[in-house]
Image: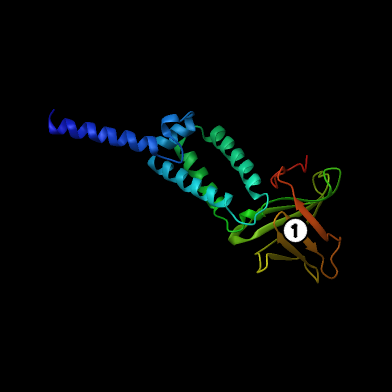
Amino acid sequence: MRPSTRFALAALCFASAGLTSAASFDCAKAGNATEKAICADPGLSRQDEALAALYQRQLEMPDAGQWGTILRRDQRDWIAVRNRECKGNAECLKQDYQRRIAYLSHPLLQWMGRYVQGKCPHEGRFLDVTPGDAGQLDVEIYICPNPRGNMLLQGRNVLEAGQRLRVAEGGRCTRTFQFAADRITVADGAECTPALKGVYVRDPRRSPFELEGVK
């Protein structure tokens, strides 16, 4: 066998081996157009590996209560939408991965969730926490059940030392949100109406991105 032929065969074997071990899964078992597109594109493969590492880091977050259960559901939902919307379109996938990597990199993501006070969905209130810009958290409180337009509070701020977040509503009203694993204790400041104080408990079955309220 000529040296050039041996070199070509070796290069082919190396490329095949690299393709099989690319991404965060076994490319030899790629089962749909999305997975095949990831394995065929080195840039996408690197994004998939980076995302998998971030996802695992989030799952291993200490003292985060039900966060792992919530994140697994969230990841399954993202994968389903990714496969349905992008299919094998590499550019669509790269943009989607870029957004997802930024999302999983948020320093306060482990507090995300829907926190319930009372007997939602029949009565009570729920508090939605989602990641905001510049390392902040967004908080919104609604009445249960949630017909559109019944928001009681909307605010955003950074989490202070001791896992405390303050939201000023103008005037002399500042509410304090004390975060702990799967619980948020809300304290009303002076002149705050309506009263929203109390303990809100995170429900791992619910998503803060649901538009029509707790089901």
Looking at the image, residue 80 lies above or below residue 59: above
Q: Compare residues 122 and 71 and report the one nearer the observer.
A: 71
Q: Looking at the rendering, in which quadrant would you find the C terminus?
A: top right
- Residue 78's spot in the image, x, y percent? 59, 40
Task: Answer with left or right where residue 39 lies relative to residue 119.
Answer: left
Location of residue 14 by image quarter: top left
Which residue is label 1 attached to? 184
- Residue 81's spot in the image, x, y percent? 58, 36
Q: Compare residues 70 and 91 and report the one nearer the observer.
A: 70
At x 41%, y 30%, the residue is 28
At x 71%, y 59%, the residue is 180
Looking at the image, residue 165 lies above or below residue 106: below
Color encoding of the figure = rainbow
Location of residue 171 by image quarter: bottom right
- Residue 187's spot in the image, x, y percent? 80, 65
Task: Answer with left or right where residue 59 lies relative to residue 202.
Answer: left
Crowding near pointer 1: few (<14 within 10 Å), some, many (20+)? many
- Residue 34's spot in the image, x, y percent? 48, 33
Q: Compare residues 169 and 60 and report the one nearer the observer.
A: 60
At x 61%, y 54%, the residue is 109
Q: Looking at the rendering, in which quadrant would you find the N terminus?
A: top left
Q: Secondary structure at mark 1?
A: strand
At x 61%, y 43%, the residue is 72
Question: Which residue is the extreme one toward the left?
Answer: 2
Task: Answer with left or right where residue 110 lies relative to residue 1.
Answer: right
Q: Amino acid at mark 1?
A: Ile
Image mark count: 1
Task: Answer with left or right where residue 124 lies relative to residue 39.
Answer: right
